[in-house]
Image (cartoon, rainbow, N blue to C red):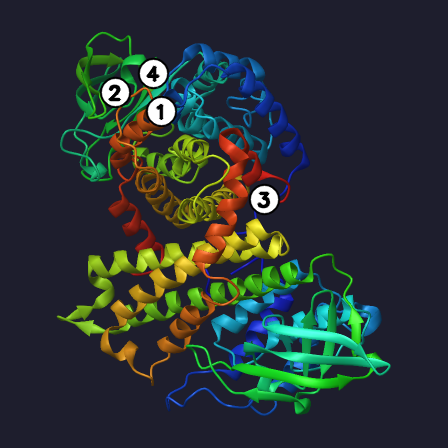
């Protein structure tokens, strides 16, 4: 019996009841949102919407009540996430903080960090970005050079972070940097950085879709208190890897272009051709399979397992699927893609095509993931 | 592997013992190997879906389908799924189960008419799985089934790509009243198609897991340019892709097992498993090189089955179109609820 284990995801009546509630809320809250905005998926930034979700208790909902959470199950959280993504809700403001920074702080943060940040994240009011990549450290994350020199009063940080999504709209960064001797994976730590601290410059980088998510973040003699340290000094690599595996298997790894599929179905109408029906049917088959795998990984994480191999498999398959939706859509509906078009389908297709390359780059490139899978199979 | 039920492990051990390596490169047998069906019967597998009151194991399809992974994982030459299906039908028709092996005839053109206090069955069907090895043929005609002794049928042997029996069956015979019954099922044809696809998806999941294991092992053993193939990044990445397809195939089988009569979910499972079969088989052969292309090597026993099974009980093209036609009319707002409804 040599199959890679993906236990069946649990069924939860409570989660299904919650699904109806979330659906009703979203239908009303996003009634006027056009498909060309929905395709921005979890890159759509809307603090007012994030606060509304926070009021409902749908951010950080698995966290303890003492920290602003609702102590709900992983299955319930999954339902909220996938319902948000399925309608292209603008979740970017709180998404990264809720998905990975909050859980990281909950697992490794000090009591002060937990009680200060988590309730605000859960309220949809405090946004966090991830300072990992650097100009000379992309996939090769262990070669980061940004250094936090220990001083009498804490740390002095110098260096540059790159491709930092939403740094310009975030309150804090979780910074992976060198705090000690050693190279590679040694001597790395994670620091909690208030982005209002003097010495931090945030420079925009426009992407090829004309969107502004990316930034370069420059640190020049930035002074941080010793309380900025998250977890243990020198354990930054292990903490960051655990954090990354949290972001590899969620529904956002295969639903980023789902609003385009929904729009394709809309323009096909009630009488699709055989070929168009088959194209949609095939994508639906991939979607239900990915959803099964993703929910299975969520259940394993909830059980305290470390399904790094499974998460990498889901993200690799999911990114290819998200990219393929755009290619299939253009093969079925002969519509020229244009962000400026009056056709919502055309505009959504254009956005999907121009953002698709990022799907197999962000959160671990396809090549890094296949390396992780190969290691999990014992090939390396 | 944890979390697998003990019965699945027992079936896996049993079938693994039957069909070990095939070093002589012998062709697929033309008869069941001596003792193998008896051992399968001793475990109660042909009657897995029959109620305990009638001498069966009393499983439902969600529990029985995962047992069939072992058929694919060990390339077992046994009509196990087909016999389970036949007995499930017999039970739904209120008839006694049989140890088999049994063949289900659900395609083709048939007429079943009353005659002389009994019935007359006439017609023919192409590519009936395992017909020539069956002790009984269970012919489904609309909402009735007829039990036919193979001696009263004309059976012309045929085979699928893997060499499994797929025989042409023709019957023109009078049957006694006792051999015909009504199936308690509002749509037996649809259900048989779904269950056939679910059976194939389950076996394909097992075969996919096996070709992944074979390829991992081969890449570790085979030395070229002074190091194992597994040391080459391009080989690692190709095998990682096989692992992804095997995972998708496993998920597909689980989806089908959980809702074996839901045409959307079973169809989705068959589509995804079929696609996984094509991709993974091609990559497994690429990693194995010429030796994997030979008849004496084990790999082809699994890849040929994958290529055969993906086209049986509805190909990817067939099911994709069916799913699409069912889902597209749901529209922009209805699509997601349709994909996540109930057990989906």
Residue occupied by mark 2? A211
- Whether residue A33 is visible here, answered yes or no, is yes
Residues packed near mark 1 inside 10 Å, few (<14), some (14 to 19) or many (20 plus): many
Tell me the distance, in whole angstroms, between the alpha carbons under discs 3 and 2. 35 Å
Mark 2 element type = loop
Locate residue A231, reporting x and y percent.
Answer: 38, 28
Residues packed near mark 2 inside 10 Å, few (<14), some (14 to 19) or many (20 plus): some
Q: Which residue shows up at 69% across the image and 62% down it? A: B188
For discs 1 and 4, the disc positioned in front in the rendered view: 1
Locate residue A129, reporting x and y percent.
Answer: 32, 21
For discs 4 and 2, the disc positioned in front in the rendered view: 2
Q: Are marks 3 and 1 in contact (CB under 8 Å)?
A: no
Tell me the distance, in whole angstroms, between the alpha carbons under discs 4 and 2. 21 Å
Give the mark, 1 or 4, whose residue is nearer the N terminus: 1
Mark 4 element type = strand
Residue with the most extreme right position: B117
Whether A95 is drawn above or below B48: the answer is above
Q: Are marks 1 and 2 in contact (CB under 8 Å)?
A: yes
Tell me the distance, in whole angstroms, between the alpha carbons under discs 1 and 2. 10 Å
Residue occupied by mark 3? B344
Instruction: Establish whether labels 1 and 2 are both on one chain.
Output: yes
Q: Quadrant of residue A19?
A: top right
């Amino acid at each position: 019996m040599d199959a890679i284990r993906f236990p069946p995801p649990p069924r939860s009546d409570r989660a299904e009841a919650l699904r109806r509630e979330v659906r009703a809320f979203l239908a009303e809250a996003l009634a006027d949102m056009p498909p060309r905005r929905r395709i921005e998926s979890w890159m759509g930034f809307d603090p007012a919407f994030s606060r509304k979700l926070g009021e409902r208790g749908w951010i950080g909902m698995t966290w303890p009540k003492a920290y602003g959470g609702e102590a709900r199950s992983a299955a319930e959280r999954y339902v909220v996430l996938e319902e948000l993504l399925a309608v292209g809700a603008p979740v970017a403001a709180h998404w990264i903080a809720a998905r990975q920074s909050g859980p990281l702080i909950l697992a490794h943060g000090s009591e002060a960090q937990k009680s200060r940040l988590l309730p605000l994240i859960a309220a949809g009011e405090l946004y966090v970005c991830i300072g990992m990549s650097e100009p000379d450290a992309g996939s090769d994350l262990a070669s980061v050079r940004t250094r936090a020199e220990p001083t009498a009063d804490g740390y002095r940080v110098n260096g540059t972070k790159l491709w930092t999504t939403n740094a310009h709209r975030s309150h804090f960064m979780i910074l992976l940097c060198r705090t000690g001797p050693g190279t590679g994976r040694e001597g790395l730590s994670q620091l909690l950085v208030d982005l209002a601290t003097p010495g931090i410059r945030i420079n925009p980088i426009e992407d090829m879709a004309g969107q502004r998510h990316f930034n370069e973040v420059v640190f020049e003699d930035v002074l941080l208190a010793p309380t900025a340290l998250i977890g243990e000094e020198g354990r930054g690599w292990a903490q960051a890897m655990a954090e990354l595996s949290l972001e590899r298997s969620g529904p956002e790894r295969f639903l980023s272009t789902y609003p385009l599929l929904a729009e394709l179905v809309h323009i096909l109408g009630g009488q699709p051709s055989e070929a168009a029906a088959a194209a949609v049917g095939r994508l639906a088959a991939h979607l239900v399979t990915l959803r099964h795998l993703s929910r299975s990984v969520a259940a394993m994480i909830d059980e305290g397992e470390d399904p790094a191999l499974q998460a990498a498999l889901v993200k690799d398959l999911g990114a290819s699927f998200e990219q393929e939706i755009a290619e299939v859509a253009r093969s079925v509906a002969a519509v020229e893609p244009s962000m400026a078009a009056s056709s919502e389908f055309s505009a959504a297709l254009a956005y999907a095509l121009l953002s698709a390359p990022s799907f197999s780059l962000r959160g671990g490139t396809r090549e890094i993931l296949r390396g992780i899978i190969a290691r999990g199979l014992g090939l390396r | 592997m944890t979390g697998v039920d003990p019965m699945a492990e027992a079936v896996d051990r049993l079938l693994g013992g039957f069909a070990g390596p095939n070093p002589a490169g012998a062709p697929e047998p033309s008869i069941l190997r001596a003792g193998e069906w008896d051992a399968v019967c001793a475990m109660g597998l042909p009657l897995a879906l029959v109620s305990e009151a009638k001498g069966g194991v009393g499983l439902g399809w969600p529990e029985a389908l995962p047992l069939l992974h072992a058929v694919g994982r060990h390339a077992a030459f046994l009509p196990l799924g087909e016999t389970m299906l036949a007995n499930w039908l017999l039970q739904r028709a209120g008839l006694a189960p049989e140890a088999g092996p049994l063949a289900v005839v659900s395609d083709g053109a048939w007429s079943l008419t009353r005659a002389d206090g009994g019935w007359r069955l006439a017609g023919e069907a192409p590519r009936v799985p395992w017909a020539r090895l069956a002790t009984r043929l269970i012919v489904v005609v609309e909402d009735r089934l007829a039990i036919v002794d193979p001696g009263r049928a004309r059976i012309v042997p045929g085979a699928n790509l893997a060499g499994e029996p797929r025989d042409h069956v023709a019957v023109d015979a009078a049957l006694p009243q006792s051999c015909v019954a009504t199936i308690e099922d509002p749509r037996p044809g649809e259900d048989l198609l779904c269950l056939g696809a679910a059976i194939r998806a389950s076996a394909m999941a097992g075969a996919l897991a096996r070709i992944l294991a074979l390829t991992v092992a081969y890449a570790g053993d085979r030395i070229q340019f002074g190091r194992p193939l597994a040391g080459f990044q391009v080989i690692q990445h190709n095998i990682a892709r096989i692992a992804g397809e095997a995972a998708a195939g496993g998920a597909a089988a689980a989806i089908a097992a959980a809702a074996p009569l839901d045409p959307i979910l079973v169809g989705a499972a068959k589509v995804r498993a079929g696609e996984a079969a094509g991709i993974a088989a091609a990559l497994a052969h690429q990693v194995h090189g010429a030796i994997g292309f030979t008849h004496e090597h084990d790999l082809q026993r699994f890849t040929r089955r994958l290529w055969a099974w993906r086209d049986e009980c509805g190909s990817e093209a067939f099911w994709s179109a069916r799913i699409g036609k069912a889902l597209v009319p749901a529209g922009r707002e209805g699509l997601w609820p349709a994909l996540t409804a109930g057990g989906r």
